[in-house]
């Protein structure tokens, strides 16, 4: 990348990935928020981020599908953003796998 004074600046690969993904989302008209992966979220914030209900997210936390921890001396839980994103990726991979299986089944029914 060239700086305003004509120098060159090497960008870390991860930063380039974030910038490209952000540019793609912005070009689709979506909002983009950049947060550190160690940010801690409440179950309600986790639910909002995932587009799920808070009671459903609570069940996911209880089952250990999304790691969480209790705040010291409290029954309130927090979830690391990195764990929420990892859960979301696993969920999307499963969804894509099911879609591919459905496509194969549809193709075999059409051919037969």
Image (cartoon, rainbow, N blue to C red):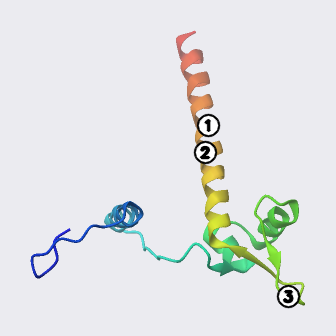
Vertical comparison of 94 with 8: above or below = above
Q: Which comes before the other along the chain, label 3 or label 2?
A: 3
Whether tag 2 and tag 1 are in contact, CB under 8 A, the answer is: yes
Per the image, the residue denoted by label 1 is 97
Vertical comparison of 89 with 9: above or below = above
Per the image, the residue denoted by label 2 is 93
Q: Residue furthest top?
A: 112
Vertical comparison of 99 with 103: above or below = below
Characterize the local packing of mark 1: few (<14), some (14-19) or many (20 or more) Cα atoms within 10 angstroms. Answer: few
**Which quadrant of the figure has residue 38?**
bottom right
Name the residue nearer the viewer: 2 or 108. Answer: 2
Give the position of the C terminus as an image quadrant.
top right
- Given this view, does label 1 or label 3 mark the residue nearer the observer? 3
**What distance separates the C-alpha of mark 2 from that of mark 1?**
6 Å
> Which residue occupies 35% across, 68% down?
26
* Left or right of residue 56, residue 39 in this image: left
Characterize the local packing of mark 3: few (<14), some (14-19) or many (20 or more) Cα atoms within 10 angstroms. Answer: few
Name the residue nearer the viewer: 29 or 4. Answer: 4
Whether tag 1 and tag 3 are in contact, CB under 8 A, the answer is: no
> Which residue occupies 38% across, 67% down?
15
Q: Residue 48: give x, y in percent of width and height.
A: 64, 74
Q: Residue 3: give x, y in percent of width and height.
A: 16, 77
Q: Residue 74: give x, y in percent of width and height.
A: 89, 88
> Which residue occupies 59% across, 37% down?
99
- Given this view, does label 3 or label 2 mark the residue nearer the observer? 3
**Element at label 2:** helix
**Element at label 3:** loop
**Which quadrant of the figure has residue 67?**
bottom right
In this orientation, does residue 45 appear?
Answer: yes
Name the residue nearer the viewer: 111 or 19. Answer: 19
**What distance separates the C-alpha of mark 3 from that of mark 2?**
34 Å
Per the image, the residue denoted by label 3 is 72
């Amino acid at each position: 990348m060239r700086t305003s004074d004509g120098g060159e600046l090497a960008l870390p690969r991860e930063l380039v990935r974030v910038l490209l993904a952000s540019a793609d989302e912005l070009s689709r008209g979506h909002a983009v928020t950049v947060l550190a992966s160690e940010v801690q979220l409440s179950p309600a914030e986790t639910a909002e981020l995932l587009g799920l209900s808070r009671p459903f997210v609570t069940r996911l936390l209880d089952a250990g599908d999304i790691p969480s921890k209790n705040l010291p001396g409290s029954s309130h839980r927090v979830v690391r953003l990195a764990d929420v994103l990892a859960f979301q990726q696993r969920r999307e991979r499963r969804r894509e796998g099911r879609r591919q299986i459905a496509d194969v089944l549809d193709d075999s029914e059409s051919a037969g």
